[in-house]
Every structure is written in structure tokens, then in C-alpha cells.
Image (tube, grey):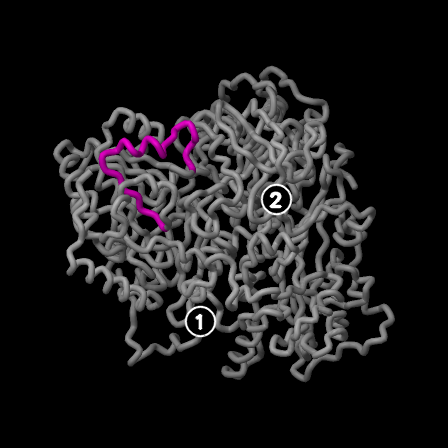
Amino acid sequence: MSPLIPPSRREALRLLGSGITLAAGGCSRPAEEIVPYVRAPEQLLPGVPARYATALSLSGWARGVHAIAVDGRPIKIEGNPLHPGSLGATDLFAEAAILDLYDPDRSRTVTERVNGIASWDMFERALSGPLATVQRVRGRGLHLVTGRITSPTLARQIEGLLRALPEAAWHVHEPVDDGNAERGAELAFGRPLRALPRLDRAEMILCVGADPLGPGPDQIRLSRAFIERRRDSARFGRLYVAEAALTPTGVKADARRAVHPLDQPAILAVIANALGAGSAPPDLSDEARHFALAAADDLKAHEGRALVLAGPALAPEWHALAHWINARLRAPVDFIAPPDRIEGRMPATLADLAGALDRGSVTCLAILGSDPVATAPADLDLGARIERARFSVHAGLHGDETAGKTHWHLPLTHELESWSDLRATDGTASLVQPLLRPLYDGRSLHEILPLFAGRTATAGHALVRETWKDQGGADFGGWWRRGLHDGLIDGTAAPILDPGEPRLPALPTLRRREGFAVELRPDPCLWDGRFANNAWLQECPKPISKQVWGNALALSRNEAGRRGLEAGDVVQARVGGRSVEVPVVIESGVAEGVGVLTLGYGRERAGAIGNGIGTDGYKLATQAAPRLLTNVALTKTGGSETILRTQNYVEIEGETKTLFRQIDLAALSEATPKGIGADQPSLLAPWTGDKDGHAWAMVIDTDACIGCNACVVACQSENNVPVVGPEEIARGRMMHWLRVDIYDEGSPEAPRAGFQPVPCMHCEHAPCEPVCPVAASVHDGEGLNLQVYNRCVGTRFCEANCPYKVRRFNFFGYADGQPYANLGAESVKAQRNPNVTVRARGVMEKCTYCIQRIATERQAAERDGRPMGEVVTACQSACPTRAIRFGDLAEPGSAIAELREDPRHYALMEELNTRPRTTYLANLRSPNPALKEDHA
């Protein structure tokens, strides 16, 4: 490595001045789009939110969003209705991206491992030596590591670099990838293809280890398609799920079985044999075989409208078999060329990089936007191997585990600070535009990559425009502005291909169960660990377990009982000479002989929020077994940990059917809507309303809710809801205004569960109001239950008297002088919504139906001289499946009034006569009559 040249006094002063300038100019619009306020456009008014269409990535794939900024300060993310990857909704990762932007632990400047703070000029001088060496040998010794690349501009840059340096190597590492599915498609069709299942046309679906409604880049598209079809009772269909542990897809299943991962391929084999595959009958339990045959009969009876999905842990051969089955069923699946490929370039693997490092042939190693030290299979031991590179550099948002092993670390800009482009899973391209100048001295990957070709950094804006310069025709300026305005580029979706007839693959011998197995899954809140330092996501409850601030090994009740384990017991999981210690959590619906552990925890260099939280599942993963580990030895250590959960497991005989209404599809014609208790006698005067005549209400469709928590994080972002931290959670002091409860009227072995979002009920006869001694909890003329913060003296009588338990008390000044960890930093304060009060210590708070949005629409209507239009709450706008509806009951013919007449309508605890404005639609199920165990 070239020695670091210490900065001169002049250069040191220049660096200090640059830092001051960056800090002062961070929250302003980027130079390419800045408008002088001496002639401010009418649409950009001080204090008035402005929307900008852009895109955010998850594992490289784009989800189109609208970023909302106030005075050049981004404060909120919402979905782009024009984008096929978001359809106007968001997921919790997109919602939380705004907090990542303001993360105080983000990398701020270039650093060198020995001497600390440096500059870009110093890095370029240090790079010049190794770069000259590899250039003399046509790039041999230069190794580039990236995540999945869907950016056309970045792909063009990488392709140009590899053309100039043909001996250089490009490696791609994506911790949560579709490797088995990709290889399975090649086995079946003989060429790389990406499958896009059409859940809007598939009425009979079998998921074997697959979780299409769970977290991931395609969650919004798939869940929206699935739920929209099921809104039509004639096309409701049936969902079969065979999985190792309960998932959101399993919760929505009409027929579900807990199946050991090693037995899941046998389910596919039974289905294939029913369609004429002619393979040997697999060894399968009677219950699982009965389930598979019942699913096969339904699938065959719905040819053209039936679909089979295989999970990511299944081997490529079983994915190929799923393609063969779908071809027999004429399943609604589209195939496209993979949008994340560079034509003619097959990236190398991390195993190839490890081999090159062992040989000592790596002259220059550049790891850009990836953290392989933390997320690569443990048997590669990349942390030690990287030391063998003669020159190494890492570029990332944080000084993470990989940054700690390389010679140099470069700060990356956030996607909301930089120009780029991205493709969605269907190939549709979006332009990524910045909302503000970089807060720190970072650069985008587009600006860093030219340095490895010996060129000076080029502005990302110019590089992206160059990529698309041939698309706009004579009026490129107008085409460019339209692309920025819409948030996507028309006509860029990948063409649908005819894949041909799939081959029936040679199937591997079914593995017998040997010892205990552990399935590794991406975490529903932290994904692959890249969001470990996001406090909103750390405190967001997992959909099934409701665990926060950590992960645990999920076991069935029977498995834990056989091993003498209780919830919170710490066990050592050992396999292949590697081990971790992890607490146990007992969950319903987990298969016998298997445990499930989510990835993304146990980080050492995530930041002040994520360091030391949970157990690192990557330490058990290997190249041969990245997702499913067998022959795992579990040993009780004698220690215990408190499992932090926001909803405890409680069994109440007969109450689930009262609190969470479920209806079988066959009985829907006999169902009648339930009221809010208005027909019951009351000592309170009836609500009469205000002279303006509005009556706001919300209806939540529990059948459409997939428990994804996008609404929870959207509410937190919109309403400045504070993070309290694990210690306060352990005391039961959560602050979320909206929670998503899970109810189960089945058994621990065979759950029949459902999700129920619970915001404030805004009761017309609110129990919280008469007990407040200072009238801080009051009712307005539009039916809203209001909390007057500057009256509240913190008696908490209202909280005690609320039967729905939706009121939250500020035991500390979480957002006002007593924040958790580093959340009181000035950068975090920039995220707060200026239209929502930041609450002080000793004040009660709760859901307000986003009253600030109601007020904004009222003011706009008064200004324009028109009636009030639609008001969309934050939770409603985020919901991928449109499960939440909000509107005015007093408006003639309103959708919200019609929903109250739906036969599935009910109110939570209507017997209390609180007459809530928030009501529900019952969950629907369509159990197979041949599977009696799925009936209530």
C-alpha cells in the first residue's frame, strides 16, 4: 500500500473549512436544481411541503416513492402511484429510509485505517500507485465488489471499466439473494430468466417455503395483487402454505401445515406426480401427504388459474420442478430477462475473491456499497482474508465491519442526496433525484467509480443524463423533466418472453432428517442487517413474534418442552465448528425438529443504535448451506434473557372470536354487518356533530392486512413518535400510536391467525374524556377525540380508562432533552414534521387521525372556495394492500359509509358502548372441505 502523506497545514485548514461549509449547506436543494428565491416559483412556498418523485432500493431493486420536503428538508416518504414497484404504497424499509438519511452515525469524511481523517485528494494520491500497477497488466489484480446492480448508469460504468481493464474482476454479493431461484430457472429453461408470478390471476396458490406476502423488494406488488383479487368473492380462491415457521403468507393461508424444510421438497414431488411426473413416491407423513394431495386436486381443477411457488431455501432442482409443475398448470407467470445482468458479463462470486486473496493476486480491492465481512458465509472468513490485499478500499454509508478491515473508507451519499437510476423487479427504470445537498463529504458510487479508471470524479447528474441522452429525442429537456416528475421512464419494463417448455429436472435424493435444523431468514424489520442502526426498525415489532430490539431462535412448544427449554433460555447453537449463543422464543406454527433465526443482528460496527443487539446468524451460514443448517447441536447454557415483545402471548378462552371476527367464505352470504353499539342505552348524550357537518371515521379490513408494519413506521415518521429504547420497552412503555395485534383461534400446532391494526378508536362515548381532571382529552365537533398537550398534567387516568390501550405516556422527554442513545442529535431533529407538535415529558399522546392533514385540506378548500376533498392519513397512504380506509361518514355516498354496511363490518368490543369511529371488516377464510383440521 502507498504510504499516507500527512496533510499540510494549508490542506488541514481547507478540510476544516470544507466541513463547516458542508454542515451549513446540507439542508438545501442540490446545485443542479436550485432556484434563486429572489424570484421564487409559486409552488415552492416557505413551510409548504413539496413532493419529489424518486426511488429507493432494497437489495438493489427500486421502489418508486414520493419524498416530501419542507424548505429543502426531507421529512417523509410516501409511495408513487405510477410506479409498478410501489403502486402508491410503501413498506417499512422505505418509510424508515428518511431516518437513515439523518443518522448521526453516518460516515462523514474519508478515513484511513492508521492515520484517521483524510481527504478525497489524499485517497486519490494513495490510489494512483496500485492503479498504475493494474493498468500496466490490463487490470489484472483489480477486484471490484458490489451488491446487486440494477442501475443502468452504474451498469454502463462497470461495463466500461471492465472493457478498459479486461483482466479486472467484478464480484457481486447480495446477502439475501435469489440464487436458487435463478439457477432453477436456468435448469428448467436453459437460460437465465426471472419469473414474475401474477397473483392477481392465480386463484389457487401453493407456497412451499415461499413467503410472497412477507418482506422483500416485491412485497408491495405481490401483496396488492393477491388482496385485490380476493376482494372479489367469486375469485377469492384458496391459498395453501407449507412452511417451517409462521409467516405473513402463512397467516393469510386458508390451509397451512408446519413442514420441516427437508420435507418440503416432498410436497412438490407429490404435486408433480399428481400431474404425471412419474417419479418415485416420496416418504412423507400421512398428514402432509393428505395436505399435498388436497392441494393437487384444487390446483388441477383450476388450470390456468393455479400457481406453485418455491421458497428460497429450496435447492435449484426443486425450483426447476416448480417451473415444470406451473407449465402443466398453465400458471399465470410472466418471464423476463433478469434486469440485474450486464449483457455478456457474468459476475464472479465471493468464493472467487477468497481464492484470489489466498493466492496473493489482489493488488487493489474496492468494495462499493456492500458489507461482505458482516454478511458473507462464515466459512469464507473474509475479514481475515481482506488483510492480504495490497490495497483495499470500502465505500459505504457507515464505517461498518468491512470498513474496519480495509485500508481506506469512503463515505457514500444517501439515495435522497444523490443522482442515480434504478430498475424495479419488472425492469421498469426510475430516475433517482436528490432532495438536498449531501449532509457530509460523501460521493455516490457513480462519482467514485471513475477514480478506478484513472479519471477524475464526474457529477452524478451528468452521468445519469448521459445514460439516457438517446431516449428523449429532440426534446430531451422535456423528456428528462417528465421522467423526474413521474418518477419512472415509460416503456422501460422488460419485455415478456416465451420461456419455452421447461425440462423435468433430475431430482436429487430427498435428504432424511438428521438431528436438529436451523433455517436462516431475512429479518422482517432489519432485512439483511443493513438497517440495524435504524431505531424505528429496531423498535418495530416483528409481525409474528412481536419481538423488538433483538432476535431469537423460534421453536415449537413441543420442541422446547422436549429439550427442557422455556422462553428466554439462552442456548448454544453449534454446527461445523461454528457456534453462537441465542435466546429461545416459543412460537405457534413452528415445525418439529427445526428452529428459525432471523439475520441482521449481532452487529459490531453498525452504530450507536445497532451495536451488540441480538445474535449474528451469519456466523452459522456457509457457502454450501447459506439458508438451511442441518445437524445443529443445541446446548442449554444456563443463562437467560428477557425477550422484549410489545404483545405478550395470552390465552383467553373464547375471547378471540369476539375480539377478532373471522368468517368462512361459504358463510359470507348469511353474514350481517354489526354496528358500533349505538342501539344500546347510554347515559351520555348522543354525538351531534358540528355545523360544518364532517364526521371522520376509519374502517380497517383485517382480511387485507398482512401485518407488514408499514403503517406503524409511517405513523411514527409523520407524527414525530419517539423511540424509547429496549430498557423502556422492557417496562411496557412503548410509544407507537398504532399497533398491529395478532390473534389466533387455532392451536399452537395449527394456528388460525389474523392481524388487527389498532389505532385510537375515536369513540363517540370516549371513556378517556370524563376522567381527565383538566379536560385535556376532549371531543371536537367532527368526531375526533383530541388530546390538548398543554393542558395535560400526566395523571394517566385516561390511559387507565381506555379499554383499547392505545394511549401513550411520555415518562421521559424522549424527543425533548432525554432521547434514547444518539437520537437527540441535531441531524435527527431535521426529520421532524413541523406540522406536528413534539411532545414533552409528562404528556399523554395518541393517534389523532392525522389531524394536521385534515387541517391542511380544510385550509386548501377554504382558499380555493370548494368543498373539502379526500384526506389520506399516513397509515392509509403506506398500506400496501389498501386495508385502511378513511373518510367522512357525513358525506352522502362516501366509501367509508358504504363499508359500514358491509356484511363483514364489526366494532372492537362493541358491548362496551363506546361507539368507536374506528371499525373493522372481518377476516375471510376459504378452508378446503377435505381438510377438516382447517375448519374452526
Pick the front one: 269 or 815: 815
Q: Which residues are magenta?
A: 375-397
Position in image of residue 330 (x %, y %): 55, 33
Mark before the other along the chain sequence, 1 or 2: 1
Quarter of the view holding residue 348? top left
Residue pictured at 32% horizontal, 35% vertical: 171
Q: Amino acid at mark 2?
A: Pro
Looking at the image, residue 707 lies above or below residue 863: above
* Left or right relative to 801: residue 278: left
Left or right position of 755 against 612: right
Q: Is residue 824 magenta?
A: no
Quarter of the rendering containing residue 837: bottom right
Is there any visible trace of residue 719 in the rendered image?
Answer: yes
| Quarter occupied by residue 484 | bottom left
Q: Badge 1 is on which residue?
A: 49
Q: What is the x, y in percent for residue 33? A: 29, 67
Circle 1: residue type: Pro
- The N terminus sits in image quarter: top left
Q: Nearer the viewer, residue 792 or 528?
A: 792
Where residue 133 sits: x, y (%)? 14, 35
In depth, the one of 132 and 119 nearer the eye is 119
Q: Please, is residue 488 above or below residue 391 in the view?
A: below
Dot 2 corresponds to which residue? 248
At numbered mark 1, what does the secondary structure look like: helix, strand or loop?
A: loop
Assess whether residue 395 is covered by the magenta stretch.
yes
